[in-house]
Image (tube, rainbow, N blue to C red):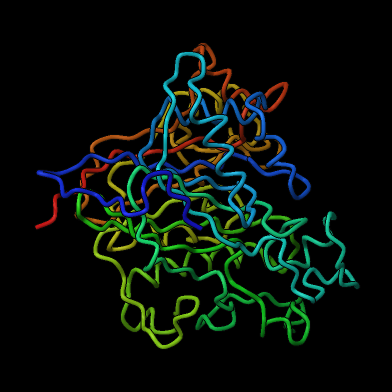
């Protein structure tokens, strides 16, 4: 769904030279426990969590923003209310921000499969429970929970958007399909014929930036947790990330892929792109399948030369200790503040540009504890915004030749 706030025929005027664009991803935890609850919370401008999320966005002022964990509704009401009642109202000295273009679409979270996917012994078909979520294509207690939303200052070519949210896991060659301890398939008979790989969605959104097309690749793979020895979520996380790796390789590696509704068209990877989202995989720590995120970080088409950092992440790791003390990765690149008793803070949120796009800056919005803006991310004693941090890169997009 695209919701333009400008005239429908508005187009981008070609730039005289290169354009510096700030791309950001933010798992903002704007999800709620029941359908319509997010709309209700955003219908007035005084929801504390949404206000803190909005202020973070205003202070970073991204030009293109992916929000993970934003409940989807088919009319786009929540997205419109967040723009009107939060982003468009300057907060605590931060300037209001307007996004003329928006995109949201159906996701797999909360869409029931009809099968007992968690092998609990029953198919839970009543919404609003963990059992229902476990039997959905992607965990969600109702359809659309934990959805995705894109806000952009640049036009989105709605006619050429691609989505892979219907792609079936079994159709990926060499898929890491989970098995029981005896080697038999984890999922019940028939389930894999309908089981979708993407736990939310994989979107390819063409952006018109000064006359040049840059594709935004947006996703949010499942966390590699909340399962058992079969590691079904860890393996799915790996293969959700692999989908992008194969897509960007193109050719024979992507020969099995088809976008939704385009069964007769082979994949042509874009020349210029930025891949963003909460990938739920850290290159050194956490519970993901080994080398899951390395499929992107070592990809020949992705520029990983600039890693966003923050002083606040390094400080948090030192002060919180516990699981953080035993981690291998550099704490200053962490993007999420997870349970220190078992997981610790991790780098799971990424903005990854294609080679050929020049990165000139970026950071993780994670203020140190003595910074006045720490109030926006402070997790204790109560959640101020999200357990994730906004991550951004400033990228030079060249003018069209």
- Residue beneath the point at 72% across and 38% down: 40
- Residue beneath the point at 63% across and 55% down: 223
Q: Position of residue 322 (x, y in %)?
A: 66, 31
In the image, taking residue 270 as reference, residue 347 lies left or right, namely right
- Residue beneath the point at 56% across and 58% down: 221
Image: 288 above or below 341: below
Q: Nearer the viewer, residue 189 or 305?
A: 189
Image: 396 above or below 301: above
Q: Position of residue 386 (x, y in %)?
A: 61, 34
**Residue 37 shows in this picture:** yes
Q: Position of residue 65 (x, y in %)?
A: 43, 43
Residue 151 picture quarter: top left
Q: Nearer the viewer, residue 309 or 183?
A: 309
In the image, taking residue 76 as reference, residue 303 lies left or right, namely left
**Residue 298 shows in this picture:** no
Q: Position of residue 130 (x, y in %)?
A: 82, 56
Q: Nearer the viewer, residue 56 or 352?
A: 56
Q: Quadrant of the C terminus?
A: bottom left
Residue 177 picture quarter: bottom right
Image: 359 above or below 217: above
């Amino acid at each position: 769904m695209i919701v333009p706030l400008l005239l429908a025929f508005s187009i981008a005027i070609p730039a005289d030279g290169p354009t510096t664009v700030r791309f950001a991803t933010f798992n903002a935890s704007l999800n709620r426990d029941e359908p319509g609850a997010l709309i209700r919370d955003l219908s007035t401008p005084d929801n504390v969590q949404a206000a803190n999320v909005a202020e973070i966005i205003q202070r970073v002022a991204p030009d293109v923003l992916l929000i993970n964990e934003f409940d989807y509704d088919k009319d786009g009401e929540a997205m419109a209310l967040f723009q009107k009642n939060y982003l468009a109202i300057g907060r605590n000295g931060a300037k209001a921000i307007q996004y003329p273009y928006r995109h949201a679409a159906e996701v797999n979270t909360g869409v029931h499969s009809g099968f007992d996917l968690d092998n609990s012994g029953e198919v839970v078909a009543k919404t609003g429970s963990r059992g229902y979520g476990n039997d959905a294509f992607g965990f969600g207690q109702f359809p659309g929970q934990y959805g995705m939303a894109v806000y952009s200052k640049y036009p989105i070519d709605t006619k050429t958007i691609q989505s892979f949210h219907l792609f079936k896991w079994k159709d990926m060659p060499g898929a890491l399909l989970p098995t029981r301890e005896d080697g038999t398939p984890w999922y019940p008979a028939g389930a894999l014929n309908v089981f979708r790989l993407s736990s939310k969605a994989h979107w390819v959104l063409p952006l018109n930036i000064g006359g040049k097309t840059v594709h935004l690749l947006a996703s949010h793979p499942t966390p590699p947790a909340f399962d058992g020895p079969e590691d079904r979520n860890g393996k799915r996380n790996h293969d959700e990330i692999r989908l992008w790796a194969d897509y960007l390789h193109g050719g024979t590696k992507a020969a099995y892929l088809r976008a939704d509704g385009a069964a007769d068209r082979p994949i042509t990877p874009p020349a210029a792109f930025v891949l963003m989202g909460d990938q739920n995989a850290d290159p050194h720590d956490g519970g993901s399948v080994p080398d899951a995120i390395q499929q992107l970080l070592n990809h020949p088409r992705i520029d990983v030369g600039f890693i966003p950092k923050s002083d606040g992440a390094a400080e948090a790791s030192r002060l919180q200790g516990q699981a953080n003390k035993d981690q291998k990765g550099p704490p200053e690149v962490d993007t999420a503040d997870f349970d220190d008793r078992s997981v610790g803070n991790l780098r799971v949120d990424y903005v990854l540009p294609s080679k050929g796009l020049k990165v000139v800056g970026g950071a993780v919005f994670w203020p140190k504890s003595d910074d006045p803006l720490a109030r926006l991310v402070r997790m204790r004693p109560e959640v101020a915004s999200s357990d994730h941090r906004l991550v951004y890169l400033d990228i030079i997009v060249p003018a069209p030749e």
